[in-house]
Image (cartoon, rainbow, N blue to C red):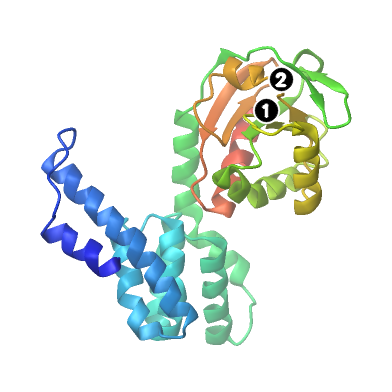
Amino acid sequence: ATMYAKKEITAPTDKKPENLTVKQWKEQRERTYAMYGDTYAFILYKLGEYKQGLPYAKEAATINKLKNAEYNERYAQLAEKAMPANETIVLLEQFVKDGAASPKTKDILKSLYVVQHKNDEGYEAYIANLGMDAKAKKQAEILSSIINEPSPSFSLRDMDGKTVSLQELKGKTIIVDFWATWCGPCIASMPGMKKAVEKFHANENVKFLFVDTWENVDDKLKNAKDFMTKKGYPFYVLMDYDNKMVEDFKVSGIPTKFIIDKNGNIRFKSIGFGGNTDELVDEISTMIELSSK
């Protein structure tokens, strides 16, 4: 599949779709190759064939302009095994500076740092300094996306049958996370959301609501309870049985998160999950802090 996708870049067997430009069509074929190449690189990594896997990981990450944390992670894993340590450190440092380093990539960088310095003393300051520019840039992006519109009113029951409404939560900053048990990106984002919940656990003025919606099962409540029990997440779940709340918020895809300020106005909207847990925590934290002001 990887070899086939590679050939398709330079010698496509299909005709160009009418809705795409020549450039867009080529970029689409390159992304397809990157997807296969990244998977193949990971297989080679698991087989211990690091030198063979490295070129595929590098190419897949480069096609994504070294900005995709998931592809960069694969590149980092193979670089650690197949490249000189000093070159790998420079590469991973740039990922952190660009805000495109996953937690695993940072773990690899930390292990290299420890080997280089004989201990982990100073690592936290080192990694924080590397990420300063990316964090400032991300905060500026978040600030530029601020909105101010009244939140739709809602009143839903939690998994214990207690009714929760927007009106009774006024005065708090509310994070509404629309999700479903079948939604892969929703589930992938949950470790990050767990960290965010724990970070603000002691703040009584911040309330997280995880709205279970768009479920196609007979017993939606049991389905949600079983999922949370199995995963062990300490989330406060509301049941959108008839999908009314998700429709009122005009959600087109999940996960979608809304940050509502103490006056009941939506200040931020975040769609999807980019695959970077740390970035998600920082993003949600920044939105909460800005909304609280």
In the rendered image, the quadrant that contains the N terminus is: bottom left
Q: What residue type is labelled 2?
A: Lys
Residue count near mark 2 (Cα–Cα under 10 Å), binned few <14, some 14–19, many ≥20: some
Q: Name the residue under label 2.
A: 262
Q: In x, y percent, where is residue 20?
A: 18, 37
Q: Name the residue under label 1.
A: 292
* Residue at left offset 36%, top offset 78%: 53
Q: Which amino acid does label 1 sit on?
A: Ser
The answer to which quarter of the image holds residue 36 is bottom left
Q: In x, y percent, where is residue 242?
A: 68, 19
Q: Which of 274 and 285 is in front in this view?
A: 274
The answer to which quarter of the image holds residue 125 is bottom right
* Residue at left offset 18%, top offset 59%: 8
Q: Where 255 sits versus 248, above or below?
A: below
The answer to which quarter of the image holds residue 284 is top right
Q: In x, y percent, where is residue 113?
A: 54, 79
SS under mark 1 = helix
* Residue at left offset 47%, top offset 43%: 138
SS under mark 2 = loop
